[in-house]
């Protein structure tokens, strides 16, 4: 056995000890990071009767009709400004509707609710539509600014300036129904993504209301 052997073995042992120590520290650090991440990455989801869930459901219904009306006028209007505006409405609201559908899937909640429309808004002082259980579905749809089936049929049948003006009248009322819904969930909701989208609805649809009223004036629409 050479004179170098007793010196080499302790060196090897200490190298191994150092590597093991580093590995243990790294694993402990990783576990700590993972635990902390797990504690913050999976917050409680909104409940079935929450404002967030109610908004996601009711606004999907609302957006579906807006997309339908916007695409109808986009296909046949001869007004370039209105065509651009209707395209923007359709694409924006179709995208938002998809987000809302995805939220409910992520939260493990059904897309439909057993409660009447806008029940989730009742706790809002400024934006409540009152006792929804005492109102008919049509009354609630009217408060949401939803067009009736007869109005939609009329929009499909009309052409030219009469169609443009009817669309503007229906979509202005539609936006005026959507904005209070968005304001209510900003007041009552908890999910940051919901509140962010609701804020964009208030901002975007307020600007679209101004644009539609300007077009109404330019086209000399009446009432």
Image (spheres, helix red, strand yellow):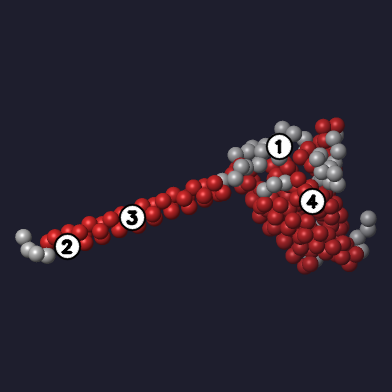
Q: Looking at the picture, how far across and down is residue 159, in whole percent? A: 82, 57
Say whether disc 3 or disc 2 marks the residue closer to the N-terminus. Answer: 2
Pointers 3 and 2 in contact (C-beta within 8 Å): no
Q: Looking at the picture, how far across and down is residue 119, in whole percent? A: 78, 38
Say which of marks 4 and 3 sits in front.
Answer: 3
Secondary structure beneath disc 3?
helix
Q: Is residue 140 left or right of residue 24?
A: right
The residue wearing badge 3 is 21
Quick one: label 4, few (<14), some, or many (20+) residues within 10 Å?
Answer: many
Quarter location, residue 148: top right
The residue wearing badge 2 is 8
Secondary structure beneath disc 1?
loop
Quarter location, residue 53: top right
Pointers 1 and 2 in contact (C-beta within 8 Å): no
- Can you say which quadrant of the picture contains the C terminus? bottom right
Quick one: label 1, few (<14), some, or many (20+) residues within 10 Å?
Answer: some
Say whether disc 2 or disc 4 marks the residue closer to the N-terminus. Answer: 2
- Residue farthest along the right direction in this orientation: 223
Q: Looking at the picture, how far across and down is residue 47, in whole percent? A: 66, 38
Say whether disc 1 or disc 4 marks the residue closer to the N-terminus. Answer: 1
Residue at the image point whose x is 56% and y is 49% from the top: 40
Q: Looking at the picture, how far across and down is residue 111, in whole percent? A: 66, 40
The residue wearing badge 1 is 49
């Amino acid at each position: 056995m050479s004179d170098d052997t007793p010196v080499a073995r302790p060196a090897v042992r200490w190298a191994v000890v150092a590597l093991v120590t580093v590995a243990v520290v790294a694993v402990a650090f990783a576990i700590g990071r993972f635990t902390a991440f797990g504690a913050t990455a999976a917050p409680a989801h909104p409940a079935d009767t929450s404002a967030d869930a109610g908004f996601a459901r009711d606004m999907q219904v609302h957006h579906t009709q807006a997309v339908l009306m916007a695409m109808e006028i986009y296909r046949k209007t001869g007004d370039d400004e209105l065509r651009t505006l209707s395209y923007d409405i359709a694409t924006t609201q179709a995208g938002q509707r998809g987000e809302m559908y995805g939220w409910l899937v992520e939260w493990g909640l059904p897309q439909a609710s057993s409660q009447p429309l806008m029940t989730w808004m009742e706790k809002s002082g400024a934006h409540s539509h009152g006792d929804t259980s005492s109102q008919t579905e049509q009354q609630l749809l009217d408060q949401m600014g939803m067009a009736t089936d007869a109005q939609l049929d009329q929009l499909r049948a009309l052409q030219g300036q009469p169609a443009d003006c009817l669309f503007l009248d229906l979509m202005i009322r539609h936006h005026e129904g959507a904005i209070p819904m968005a304001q209510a969930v900003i007041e009552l909701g908890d999910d940051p993504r919901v509140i962010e989208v609701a804020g964009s609805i208030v901002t975007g649809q307020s600007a679209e209301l101004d644009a539609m009223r300007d077009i109404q004036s330019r086209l000399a629409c009446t009432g």
